[in-house]
Image (cartoon, grey):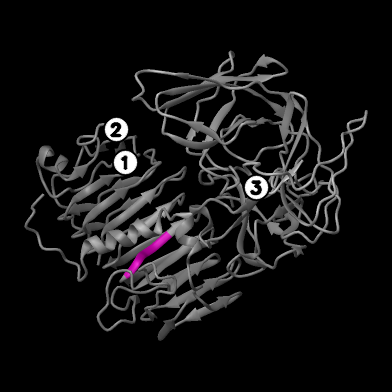
């Protein structure tokens, strides 16, 4: 099913016919931006690529991993004066899972990136998480486990994620919500290897090399709205470069972006880290028009403070 | 500290602190509403040499691999323009290649504001960021937001006068050497975040600033402060940032007093806020050093 808004309200813009025995489905959509979900009886899942932009010239391959959801249990706590509480368990194939962080976001303005409004510490072996003193309000709840072991950074192929089925979750004073979050495996990176990709998206791509011209694998390419890049959250970033140093950045909108590449994600770069800016313009800026995908945005990186 | 000391600045300090708050951190909302981009006046792509009087109106960039040398007696005058409306001047010298400033004691290189009545933050800064290197000797740098900012770059700075700036000398992740210099009448004489690379600060006079040294965050004692004079700074000789939890060694400096209790009174650190680290200032100099090479 394809919805126009993230809260999945109203009638879907389109519904596919039921998938066949091999799980294949097909969904015809007018060009536009959609939120895709899949459901079957008591199973449901959110598309990890949401929001999905559909253009007239491509037919993207988008897979879903269905998981079973149970209804939340809501119960009063305290004397009604205390702020709300959200707690529960994260599961993978029915088993509790550790090192998962659960985050609350007010909205999707930043694409659910960053730490969010609240975030739990990593779960233990029992998979239990708990957030106390949640102010009354509506939140989007997402659980993640990154292979890097870090609390921030782009989700990569093989990482685990759960987008809560009943988002946005409503927290009320004096009320506890207990939920179970089934995790799914991220199957694909939205990167240079994306299938069904057409170059009427807004973005850019290129190759990251070292000063000897050799491709550098494992780099992130960042696009910032501000020229003093390090002080801000990036507007967009690539998944890591492949063995040929290739990357691809999808931008949220047309505009001028300042472009850099580094090996790590989060906090400031440290001595020894590979780092570089796009040098095609003096200010490292790149102006991208809507539905234009620029090629050849190559970046040279070098180790910080290492001659 | 003496509350009756007279502020040396022409503009009110609260206004300068607002400037500082505006530059870092900046909210996404604020930057999205930036209305005008400051023009790039010049890009130096190979070798360039400045002498006489040079006017900077906008941004001058020394590109990676290029170099700019500035001869003694040169006056670099930055126009006052605030394109993005954040209250900070936007003319700047941005170095990603290499910078060599060669003034002399009697004939320094001057970096200043074009205003008839100049004020701190009339222009933005000399920004040396991910650059090939910098060597600056005998220069006067005044009325900037930051006199010098150096990040991710090696550099040496000596014989400088940094005055009437918001931050006189600001560095992070930069094994820079600052020596034989005078930092005065700034909001922060020195502002720094080591972030994995320490600097050397020696034989400087840091006096008459609002705060002598502002150790913001992520400092692990890698920076050497030695044989400096820290005295008569209006609020504190050293101020720790709220998240600076480690102690900072600053031994063998002159602090303006002979008694350790009086010296401690010039710090805003873990002695006041237990979550912060402390300035480890002992042993300290008991005689004001004679710094003959300092302007």
List x then y, in percent, for residue B236.
19, 49
Q: Name the mark on residue A105.
A: none
- Secondary-structure class at tag 3: loop
Q: Are marks 1 and 2 in contact (CB under 8 Å)?
A: yes
Q: Are marks 2 and 3 in contact (CB under 8 Å)?
A: no
Taking depth in this image into account, of B134 and A41 the one nearest to the observer is: A41
List x then y, in percent, for residue A4.
69, 49
* Neighbours of disc 3 within 10 Å: few (<14), some (14-19), many (20+): some
- The subunit carrying tag 2 is B
- Secondary-structure class at tag 1: loop
Seen in the picture, residue B263 relative to A247 is either above or below; the reply is above
Is residue B167 visible in the rendered image? The answer is: no
- The subunit carrying tag 1 is B
- Residue indicated by mark 1: B242
Taking depth in this image into account, of A144 and B167 the one nearest to the observer is: A144
Q: Residue at x 52, y 77 (%)?
A: B39
Taking depth in this image into account, of A42 and B205 the one nearest to the observer is: A42
- Residue indicated by mark 2: B275
- Secondary-structure class at tag 2: loop
Number of marks in picture:
3
Question: Left or right: where does residue A84 sit relative to residue B295?
Answer: right
- The subunit carrying tag 3 is A
Q: Residue at x 50, y 60 (%)?
A: A228
Placement of the C terminus of chain B among the 4 image quadrants: bottom left
- Segment colored magenta: B144-149
Looking at the magenta stretch, what is its main secondary structure? Answer: strand
């Amino acid at each position: 099913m394809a919805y126009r808004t993230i809260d999945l309200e109203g009638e879907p813009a389109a519904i596919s016919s039921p998938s066949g025995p091999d799980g294949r489905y097909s969904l015809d959509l007018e060009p536009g931006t959609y939120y895709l979900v899949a459901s079957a009886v008591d199973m449901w899942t959110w598309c990890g690529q949401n929001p999905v932009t559909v253009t007239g010239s491509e037919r993207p391959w988008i897979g879903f991993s269905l998981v079973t959801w149970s209804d939340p249990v809501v119960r009063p706590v305290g004397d009604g004066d205390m702020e709300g509480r959200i707690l529960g368990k994260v599961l993978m194939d029915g088993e509790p899972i550790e090192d998962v962080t659960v985050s609350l976001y007010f909205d999707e303005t930043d694409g659910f990136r960053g730490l969010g409004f609240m975030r739990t510490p990593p779960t233990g072996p029992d998979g239990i998480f708990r957030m106390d003193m949640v102010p009354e309000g509506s939140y989007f709840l997402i659980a993640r486990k990154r292979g890097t072991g870090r609390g921030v950074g782009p989700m990569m192929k093989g990482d685990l994620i759960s987008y809560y089925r009943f988002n946005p979750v409503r927290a009320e004073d004096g009320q506890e919500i207990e939920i179970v979050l089934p995790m799914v495996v991220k199957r694909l990176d939205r990167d240079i290897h994306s299938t069904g990709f057409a170059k009427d998206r807004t973005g850019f791509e290129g190759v990251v090399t070292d000063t000897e011209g050799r491709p550098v694998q494992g780099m992130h390419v960042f696009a910032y709205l501000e020229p003093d890049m390090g002080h801000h959250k990036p507007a967009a970033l690539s998944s890591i470069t492949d063995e040929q140093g290739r990357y691809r950045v999808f931008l949220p909108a047309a505009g001028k972006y300042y472009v850099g590449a580094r090996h790590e994600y989060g906090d400031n770069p440290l001595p020894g880290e590979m780092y570089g800016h796009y040098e095609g313009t003096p200010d490292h800026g790149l102006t991208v028009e809507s539905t234009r995908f620029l090629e050849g945005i190559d970046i040279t990186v070098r180790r910080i403070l290492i001659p | 500290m003496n509350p009756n000391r007279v502020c040396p600045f022409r503009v009110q300090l609260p206004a300068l602190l607002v400037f500082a708050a505006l530059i870092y951190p900046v909210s996404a909302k604020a930057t999205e509403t930036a209305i005008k981009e400051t023009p790039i006046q010049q890009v130096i792509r190979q070798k360039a040499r400045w002498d006489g009087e040079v006017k900077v109106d906008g941004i001058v960039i020394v590109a990676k691999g290029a170099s700019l040398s500035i001869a003694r007696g040169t006056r670099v005058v930055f126009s006052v323009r605030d394109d993005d409306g954040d209250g900070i001047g936007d003319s700047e010298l941005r170095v990603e290649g290499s910078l060599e400033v060669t003034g002399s004691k009697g004939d320094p290189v001057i970096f200043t504001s074009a205003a008839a009545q100049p004020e701190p933050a009339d222009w933005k800064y000399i920004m040396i960021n991910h650059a090939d290197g910098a060597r600056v000797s005998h220069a006067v740098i005044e009325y900037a937001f930051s006199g010098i900012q150096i990040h991710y770059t090696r550099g040496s700075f000596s014989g400088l006068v940094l005055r009437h700036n918001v931050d006189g000398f600001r560095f992070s992740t930069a094994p820079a050497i600052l020596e034989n210099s005078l930092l005065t009448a700034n909001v922060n004489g020195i502002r720094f975040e080591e972030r994995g690379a320490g600097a050397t600060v020696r034989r400087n006079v840091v006096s008459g600033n609002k705060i002598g040294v502002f150790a913001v965050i992520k400092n692990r004692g890698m920076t050497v402060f030695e044989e400096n004079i820290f005295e008569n700074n209006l609020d504190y000789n050293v101020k720790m940032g709220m998240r600076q939890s480690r102690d900072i060694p600053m031994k063998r400096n002159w602090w303006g007093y002979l008694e350790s209790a009086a010296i401690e009174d010039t710090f805003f650190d873990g002695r006041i806020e237990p979550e912060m680290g402390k300035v480890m200032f002992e042993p300290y100099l008991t005689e004001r050093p004679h710094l003959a090479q300092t302007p």
